[in-house]
Image: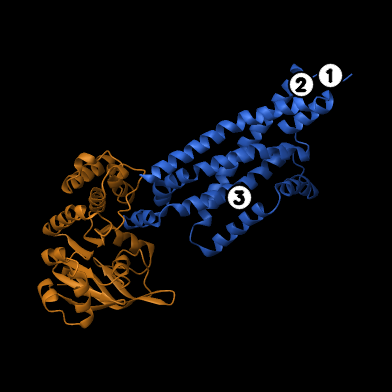
Chain colours: A orange, B blue
Amino acid sequence: MQDQILIEMKGVQKWYGGYQALRDVDLTVRRGEKIVLCGPSGSGKSTLIRCINRLEPIQQGSIVVNGHRLDGSIKAIDVVRQDVGMVFQSFNLFPHMTVLQNCMLAPIRARRIGKTDAEATARKYLERVRIGDQAEKYPAQLSGGQQQRVAIARALCVQPKVMLFDEPTSALDPEMVKEVLDTMIGLANDGMTMICVTHEMGFARQVADRVIFMAEGQIIEEGAPEAFFRNPQHARTRQFLGEILAHH
Amino acid sequence: MAPHFGLPEFGFLLRGLQWTVLLTLVAFVGGCTAGLAIALLRTCGHKGVEWITRIYIGIFQGTPLLLQLFVVYYGLALTGLKLDAFVAVAIGFTVNASAFLGEIWRGAIQAVPRGQTEAAMALGLHYSSRMRDIVMPQAIRISLPATIGYLVQLIKGTSLAAIVGFIELARAGQIVSNQTFQPLLVFGVVGAMYFILCWPLSWWGSRMEARLALASQR
């Protein structure tokens, strides 16, 4: 049973100076589970996933990823980052490297994999996000949707156990949202554990095992997508869903 | 009877030019090396270290270069360390350049978007790889126009070395002018030599700047 748990956050508190960004957050993620995190801006959902790979330190509570406790030591951070892939809202591809080099860097530098193997892995994942023919191009030569798919491939090259998505479609033009969501759906169907911060409620309905709603740094409500959307328990959730679904 | 400005005088100016170039090269290479260290320490995230480098930069940017040269040449002599004029000015210019280049590159490092470092960290890259593979290649591109601009300032600034008796191009011009009583001609030649050295660099720098501006528009 214990092996089934990939991520366990307990009593997590985080402050930025005097501002409390996370209040007593408990979250358990099982292997293969797909979670969608939603909530108004400033609700702490991005902060929450950024704590899982220690882009943000926490002040209280504990986070265990794949059996390794993030205790602040460099070794623990290292081990955890090997298991956690992340995709950012603004892609954050390395502009001075080709698509292929973007995907090969971390396996070579952080995992000490040989160049030939790293390239084979990179090409495999670039094919998987259907962008294999653009491997020699630079990020600036690609569309936003293509760049985000490269970013997904780059994260997969480190062969993580869980993928974190931080509003992956928010910076995209509407016509490019679908290609990125399709890639994520493909990944979900292959059994990847995923935590996605997104407002794409269609995506949530389609792939999420659980939808979690956050406000003011707290988890307010969570549930299976059907129940969550049909019958939200809290007024705050209903208000949020009303606002966001009004656009769709 | 004063000698006219002829080949021997021109040769003397050329030797001065050689020293100007040599002094610039030593100061620039030394300044780049030390400046890189300063820039990295200045952005390392450790409050104490950042403060020390900030004070270092503050001192060398906040006092006249002339004074710094005096301190190295005459000040160190008082402590019993008598330096050759070239060594003294080379040390003075190197230290000064390290502060200016350190500050230029500090700015360039901080101008690389935070997301680049975050992506690198999320991929599990360590500090050395983050700097070498991700941040510095972008920071160097950003800083290139300013770095070249500083190099041009440095070339012209080396004329200050004359103050401690080091004979570089400007000082050589002064000597020849005093001998020949043809200041307009002599300083015209000296000026042309500085111009030939500096102008191509300035041109390259502004071209680089234009190209970078174009690249960032894409």
Residue at 34%, 48% in the rendered image: A94
Q: Residue B63, image x and y in percent?
A: 70, 53
The chain ID associated with circle 1 is: B
Label 1 environment density (alpha carbons within 10 Å; few <14, some 14–19, many ≥20): few
- Label 2 element class: helix
On screen, residue A143 versus residue B120, left or right, reads left
- The quadrant the N terminus of chain A occupies is bottom left
Q: Amino acid at mark 2?
A: Glu
Please report contact status of discs 1 and 2: CB closer than 8 Å, yes or no: yes
Q: Amino acid at mark 1?
A: Pro
The chain ID associated with circle 2 is: B
Q: CA distance from mark 3 to mark 1?
A: 44 Å
- Label 3 element class: helix
Q: Which residue is mark 1?
A: B3
On screen, residue B42 versus residue A86, left or right, reads right
- Label 1 element class: loop
The chain ID associated with circle 3 is: B
Q: Residue A179, image x and y in percent?
A: 17, 52
Closer to the camera, A58 or A42? Answer: A42
Label placed on residue B125 = none
Question: Which mark sits nearer the N-terminus, 3 or 1?
Answer: 1
Label placed on residue B99 = 3
Closer to the camera, A219 or A82? Answer: A219
Label 2 environment density (alpha carbons within 10 Å; few <14, some 14–19, many ≥20): many
Q: Are marks 3 and 2 on the same chain?
A: yes
Q: Which residue is mark 2?
A: B9
Label 3 environment density (alpha carbons within 10 Å; few <14, some 14–19, many ≥20): many
Q: Residue A117, image x and y in percent?
A: 23, 42
